[in-house]
Amino acid sequence: MKYGIVVFPSKKLQDLANTYRKRYDSHYSKITPHITLKEAFEADETEINKISETVASIAKKYAPLNIHASRISSFFPTTNVIFFRIEPTEQLTSLHQELQNQVNIGKPKHVFIPHITIAQDLTATEHDDIYGQLRMIGVNEQETIDRIHLVYQLEDGSWTTYETYRFTGAE
Amino acid sequence: MKYGIVVFPSKKLQDLANTYRKRYDSHYSKITPHITLKEAFEADETEINKISETVASIAKKYAPLNIHASRISSFFPTTNVIFFRIEPTEQLTSLHQELQNQVNIGKPKHVFIPHITIAQDLTATEHDDIYGQLRMIGVNEQETIDRIHLVYQLEDGSWTTYETYRFTGAE
């Protein structure tokens, strides 16, 4: 089964992201707006129990995440993905690294750039048009996220939460 | 904010439900297949903390839920909803009742008939056609669900998990 580890921002920020996603994001209906902390990986039922314990113990170490969605950016020319940039912090980087090291399945495909995707699977022309518009509008939202989600994927590509863990630590 | 309390069946049963839902269920993209234990209710941030504690304490009392999706049925003529019928058990009824009594917000609109919706918002003719076909195919799946989800709704109608709780009790 395919799993992933994400955090969901507040309803307010998810609603804002969805105003763009419903028009521009091919994955709009598969999962609500999120920040990916560990990309999709394969695990079986025995492994996932252990992974769940690992995530639980990591969540116990970390304080709720302070995030700042500071501007609208793009991964072009690597991919035509437009996103809310989340300012990198030591906390986010360290959490990502620790998940990667301890849930030691799969290599990250990209350098970790925390973000909330708002557009993907665009043609080059669409990307340029939309990015031009959205960059001007921008985004500026700060908030605290107090839990992390282990999610799994169904055959149709949609994601369901397997378990949630609260950040209750000090780091 | 609008909240609800649900359990998600196994990936296998969700995948099966989605083979019908993607064609016949207008809510297909809003939430993955589930059994509703408490219908949507309004709560603010202070209330939801208390409700979360309540659900946590109820989950600690109950053993993982044994469910049996035994046949395909319909709420016609009340509504044109077609669903996997989940055999009522003392455990399910008692859990539903306890959630209703302790999370004392909103009255249930219907008698509790545990089910997984696979079709809704059909015309009368569509309902009759599709129900006739699906009833013949039927369903027969037994499984155990070991966690319960508190979910909330975004402005576009989609649902995100707020928190999960494991059934760790004996009832």
Image: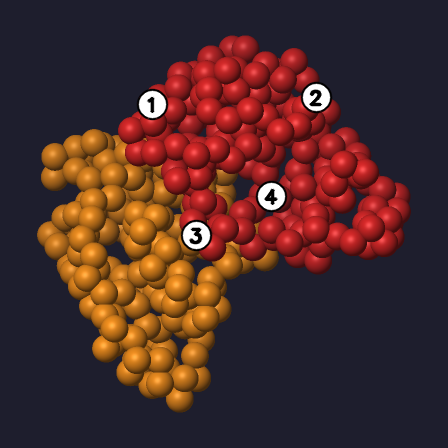
Chain colours: A red, B orange
First-in-chain label (3 vs 2)? 2
Q: Position of residue B151 (x, y in %)?
A: 43, 46
Q: In the image as oriented, which residue stretches furthest toward the bottom?
A: B125
Residue at numbered disc 2:
A88
Tag 4 near tag 1, CB within 8 Å? no
Q: Which mark is residue A50?
A: 1
Q: Closer to the camera: disc 1 or disc 3?
A: 3
Query: Which one is in front, A42 or A39?
Result: A42
In the rendered image, the vertical position of residue A136 relative to residue A168, given as above or below: below
Amino acid type at circle 1 is: Lys
Q: Chain of mark 2?
A: A
Tag 1 near tag 2, CB within 8 Å? no
Residue at the location (70% across, 51% down)?
A: A121
Q: Position of residue B72 (x, y in %)?
A: 25, 70
Amino acid type at circle 4 is: Pro
Q: Position of residue B111 (x, y in %)?
A: 24, 66
Q: Closer to the camera: disc 1 or disc 2?
A: 1
Do callouts 3 and 4 point to residues on the same chain?
yes
| Left or right position of A40 against A15 | left
Q: CA distance from mark 4 to mark 1?
A: 27 Å
Q: CA distance from mark 3 to mark 4?
A: 20 Å
Amino acid type at circle 3 is: Glu
Q: Closer to the camera: disc 3 or disc 4?
A: 3
Mark 4 nearby-residue class (10 Å; few <14, some 14–19, many ≥20): many
Residue at numbered disc 4:
A33
Do callouts 4 and 1 point to residues on the same chain?
yes
Q: CA distance from mark 1 to mark 2?
A: 28 Å
